[in-house]
Amino acid sequence: MRVRRDRTALAVAGLAVVALVVRLAALGRRVAHFDEARVAYWTLEYAETGVLFYRPIIHGPLLQHLNAALFGLFGAGDLVMRLVPALVGGLLPLSALLFRHRLRREAIVSLAFLLALNPVLVYYSRFMRGDILAGAASFVAFACLLRAVDLDDGRYLYPATVALAVGFGAKENVLAYLLAFAGAAGLLLHRRLLFARFEGAAPLAVCRAS
């Protein structure tokens, strides 16, 4: 069993390497999109002045803070401004390992493959926007919350909270993910209550039939 798990982890790690290569290859060759360029300009403005104004149109300030630091270290450029989304998207397949307690090894590797090479995820991992950061953080939070419930281990609530905080810092639509979590939890609770009702009524039905 341990050998199988190790092989699964190696397969997922290999897919993460592939994902990183796909996302980092020629990352700075494409001309900046208007949506990237204006945020990059505001990031340069913040790096030079130290003053940051909240603009709802550009969503959370996380990328501006991170890129301001990266611009100071490596200089401003198309590659540098897209580096954080590329790294986050490239490492996202590793999150498939958080589902080892629920999924078979084939399913885990398939999930990692999807996270590594899904065209939509690849595109937004090579684009300086907060979408991939918000989505990845919410996905990791979901995985941690699931482990906290399944394993009855409250320690997973801490990384879940940190992941959600990072997601909110990137983009406010993480709130939609929380609503989805709440809706899914409501459906699961309804299912459990429904089955508990039928299970509780079964002995009484048997007695009446006899």
Image (cartoon, rainbow, N blue to C red):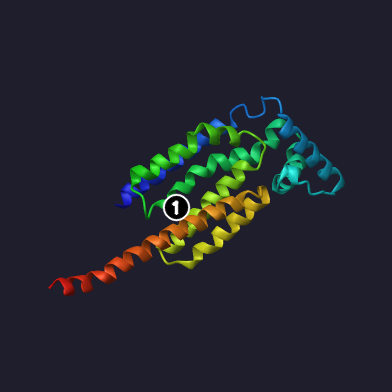
> Is residue 82 shown to the viewer in this render?
yes
Vertical relation: 21 (above or below) 67: above
Q: Is residue 51 left or right of residue 127?
A: right
Residue at point 44% right, 63% down?
Answer: 149
Residue at point 63% right, 48% down?
Answer: 173
Q: Is residue 5 left or right of residue 24?
A: left
Residue at point 70% right, 36% down?
Answer: 81
Q: Looking at the picture, how far across and down is residue 17, in whole percent?
A: 50, 37
Identify the residue position indicated by label 1 in the image.
Answer: 98
Quadrant of image for the C terminus: bottom left
Q: Looking at the picture, how far across and down is residue 54, in whole percent?
A: 79, 49
Q: Looking at the picture, how far across and down is residue 69, in whole percent?
A: 74, 45
- Tag 1: residue type? Leu
Q: Looking at the picture, how far across and down is residue 174, in whole percent?
A: 61, 51
Residue at point 59% right, 40% down?
Answer: 87
Element carrying mark 1: helix
The part of the image, by quadrant, that contains residue 193 is: bottom left
The part of the image, by quadrant, that contains residue 42 is: top right
Vertical relation: 94 (above or below) 30: below
